[in-house]
């Protein structure tokens, strides 16, 4: 598979990991949009939200649990943070592997990315 996130999960490409468990890996974005910008990625490959099936919905609980842990570990749980999932190339999804952007560390206001 030629998926950059699958290669990061497999350890073929280095990343600055924040959190990892059996189902999820979270690492800092290489092009941050905020002081804290972490990508939370399920280890099970699903291209995007639109591709979730009954079987793959199971990835959502561990991903959301990891988002909470990442927010706490980076200290943004106290100040507020934004969680974004881009769905498809027209929305800015550049890697076709389901992932969530967790951003914080500054006042994000109401401006959308």
Image (cartoon, helix red, strand yellow):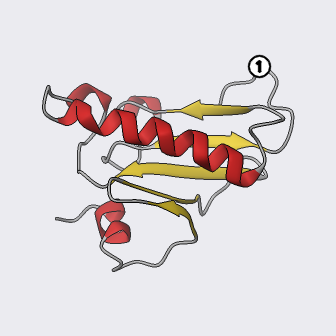
Q: Position of residue 12 (x, y in %)?
A: 33, 80
The residue lying at 84 percent from left, 34 percent from top is: 79
User: Residue drawn at (47%, 78%), measured in percent from left and top?
Assistant: 14
Q: Is residue 58 above or below residue 28?
A: above
Of residues 1 and 70, the one drawn nearer to the viewer in this rendering: 70
**56 or 61, which is in the foreground?**
61
Q: Which residue: 38% across, 69% down?
A: 8
Tell whether 81 sits left or right of 6.
Answer: right
At horizontal 45% and vertical 29% (from top left) the residue drawn is 91
Q: Residue furthest top?
A: 110
Left or right? Give the position of 19 relative to 51: right
**Quadrant in which the C terminus is drawn:** top right
Quadrant location of the N terminus in the rendered image = bottom left
* 69 is higher (above) or lower (below) than 61: below
Residue 111: image quadrant is: top right
At mark 1, the secondary structure is loop
Using a 10 Å C-alpha cutoff, classify the residue at mark 1 as few (fewer than 14 neighbours), some (14 to 19) or many (20 or more). few
Eyeballing the image, is 56 above or below 9?
A: above
Disc 1 target residue: 110
> Seen in the image, is 36 located left or right of residue 98?
right
Q: Measured from the top left, where is residue 95 in percent x and y?
A: 37, 50
């Amino acid at each position: 598979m030629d998926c950059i996130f699958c290669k990061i999960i497999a350890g073929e490409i280095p990343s600055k990991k924040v959190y990892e468990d059996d189902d999820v890996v979270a690492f800092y974005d290489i092009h941050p949009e905020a002081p804290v910008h972490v990508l939370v990625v399920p280890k099970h490959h699903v291209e995007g939200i639109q591709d979730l099936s009954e079987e793959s919905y199971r990835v959502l609980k561990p991903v959301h649990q990891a988002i909470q842990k990442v927010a706490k570990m980076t200290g943004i749980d106290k100040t507020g943070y934004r969680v974004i999932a881009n769905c498809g190339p027209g929305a800015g999804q550049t890697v076709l592997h389901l992932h969530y952007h967790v951003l914080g560390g500054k006042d994000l206001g109401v401006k959308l990315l």
